[in-house]
Amino acid sequence: MNHEELLSKIFAMLTRGTADRKSPLHTPTVATKGADGSPQVRVVVFRKFLTAERSLIFHTDLRSPKITELRADSRVSWLFYDPSEKIQFRIKSEATIHADENDALKLKQWQATRAFGRRCYMGEAPSRIAFEATSGMPAEIENREPTIEESEIGFPNFAVIAAKITSIDCLELYASGHRRSFFAWNQNDELKTDWLTP
Ligand SMILES: Cc1cc2nc3c(=O)[nH]c(=O)nc-3n(C[C@H](O)[C@H](O)[C@H](O)COP(=O)(O)O)c2cc1C
């Protein structure tokens, strides 16, 4: 496969990963620069891939520490591994936070979110010390789906992170010898490709 074919395959796999909840690509690891300078990693649900914009999208709580981290440094690194394809993607990106009440992407993604999933935006801010083990959600919706009207209280806390890919380091595992390829886009969206020793 040449670089062009490989990039098409990577983009197709990413797109499938957003739709297939069972795909290992559906829950990548996302890294930011922590407030103390150390790397901060966490699993997120990979919600959407905008191919033309090269944008990877996840949802989060506007009150979470990663938002503070992204405001200080918008660089986000992603780690994907598909064991059946034996392929790893290490992706670097620049994130934009979509959190204004009139933001089109935030509105679109909120609309696509079910009331059940909105519950985590309806309660206490994340990452606060609690007196006891807690879901952080209001008790009355812990065991039921809120109505769509009730769930709207979570909208101000909902944020969409759209991260534009700046580079992809792709490692394919083969018994006969691995292959590593590298794709990097400059500020003008011009692509440079390389083969790397694995
Ligand atoms: C399977 C799985 C999916 C998750 N999806 C998300 C997600 O889409 N967005 C999110 O903010 N946190 C998600 N989390 C929780 C994060 O991993 C993390 O614990 C939380 O966001 C707090 O991160 P922070 O303190 O760095 O802000 C998920 C965790 C797991 C295990």
Image: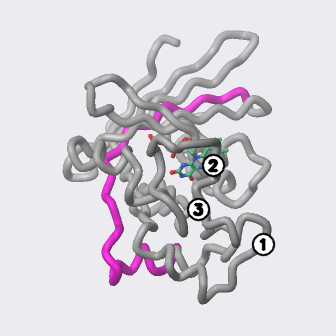
Q: Which residue is mark 1?
A: 144
The answer to whether 4 is drawn above or below residue 143 in the figure is above
Residue sitting nearer the eye, 198 or 58: 58
Q: Nearer the viewer, mark 1 or mark 2?
A: 2
Q: Secondary structure at mark 1?
A: loop
Residue 125 picture location, percent across and down: 45, 56
Q: CA distance from mark 3 to mark 2?
A: 12 Å
Relative to 60, residue 41 above or below: above
Residue 183 sits inside the magenta stretch: no
- SS at badge 3: helix
In the foreground, 83 or 64: 64
Would residue 51 be found to the left or right of residue 46 on screen? left
Are there few (<14), some (14-19), or many (20+) residues within 10 Å of tag 2?
Answer: few
Does residue 146 appear left or right of residue 45 in this picture? right
Labels 1 and 2: the sequence-earlier one = 2
- Residue 103 in the image: state x and y as whole percent: 34, 78
Residue type pointed to by label 3: Cys
The Cα atoms of the two marked residues, 3 and 1, are separated by: 13 Å
What residue sits right under mark 3 in the picture? 120
Occupied quadrant, residue 53: bottom left
Q: Residues within 10 Å of mark 3 (few under 14, many from 20)?
A: many
**Three-letter residue code for mark 2:** Thr
Q: CA distance from mark 1 to mark 2?
A: 16 Å
Give how far across and how far down residue 74 sits, in percent. Answer: 27, 46
Image point 52% across, 44% down: which residue? 130
Magenta extent: 86-109
Q: Secondary structure at mark 2?
A: loop
What residue sits right under mark 2 in the picture? 134
State yes or no: residue 92 in magenta. Answer: yes
For residue 54, above or below residue 69? below
Label 1 crowd bin: few (<14), some (14–19), many (20+), radius 10 Å = few
Q: Nearer the viewer, mark 3 or mark 2?
A: 2
